[in-house]
Image (tube, helix red, strand yellow):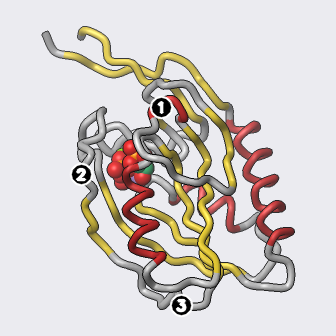
Amino acid sequence: MAKKEIIERILIPEKELMKRVEELGEEISRDFEGQEVLLVGLLKGSVIFLADLARKVTIPCMLDFMSVTSYGNDIESSGEVRFLKDLDSDINGKNVIIVEDIIDTGLTLREVLKVLKARNPKTLKVCTLLNKVDRRLVDVNVDYNGFNIPDAFVVGYGLDYAQKYRNLNYIGILKLVED
Ligand code: PRP
Ligand code: MN
Ligand code: MG
């Protein structure tokens, strides 16, 4: 039988997201006071979070993007990370903060960290909005963590299911039901 997806419930409403994003922006600005940072967004999931986060950072801040994907259109990670687009800028000697919407197995981040570390940034940090700790397959260090969340399939605020739902202004739990 065909399946369709529904938003089962709201996990994090807009107001809570905004509050936490502001706190993360303040934390980053404090930690790098007197310096500048390069926020590296991993396309496409991070774009909404990155856009809001960047506007809460009060120190000089630059933006760049990388495109990597492991999920395709599936609900489960394929475990294989594909690099689709590299950074435009040279990160040598810079304070780099990788910005992610969610860390699940950690496989995406592990590969990105490996690649960026080799380019000798001054510092290399990780900032994620959501953290699904229970699903971790590989250990990755998270410096700025928005929310720890349970192992449910979440969408919205950048996160997709088959490329949809990224435009929701909240984080919702998606459920597949019989049509
Ligand atoms: C999702 C998410 C993270 C990654 C997390 O990206 O945005 O980048 O998976 O999963 P992991 O920790 O198990 O590697 P996806 O591959 O779906 O691409 P997208 O950002 O374009 O949606
Ligand atoms: Mn992603
Ligand atoms: Mg995705």
Asked if 97 appears above or below 171 in the picture, the reply is below
Q: Distance between the residues labelled 1 and 3?
A: 35 Å
Q: In this view, does 36 lie to the left or right of 105?
A: right
Single out the residue that lies furthest toward the left: 1
Question: The N terminus lies in which quarter of the figure?
Answer: top left
Q: Nearer the viewer, residue 63 or 126?
A: 126
Residue at (81%, 52%) from the top-left corner?
23
Q: In the image, residue 174 lies at what x, y percent?
A: 43, 24
Binning the other alpha carbons within 10 Å of mark 3 as few (below 14), some (14 to 19) or many (20 upward) gives some
Q: Which amino acid does label 3 sit on?
A: Asn
Residue type at the position of mark 2: Glu
Q: Residue at x 63, y 84 (%)?
A: 122
Answer with left or right where residue 93 lies relative to residue 165. Answer: right
Write the residue at 45% across / 40% down: 104
Residue 77 percent across, percent down from the top left = 30, 40
Q: Nearer the viewer, mark 2 or mark 1?
A: 2
Q: Which of marks 2 and 3 is nearer the N terminus?
A: 2
Residue at mark 2: 80
- Tell whether 68 sits left or right of 82: right
Q: Quadrant of residue 60?
A: bottom right
**Label 1 neighbour load within 10 Å: few <14, some 14-19, many 20+:** many
Residue 154 is tagged as 1
Q: Nearer the viewer, residue 8 or 94?
A: 94
What residue is drawn where x is 73% and y is 84%? 36
Residue 145, image x, y percentages: 67, 48
Residue named by callout 3: 92
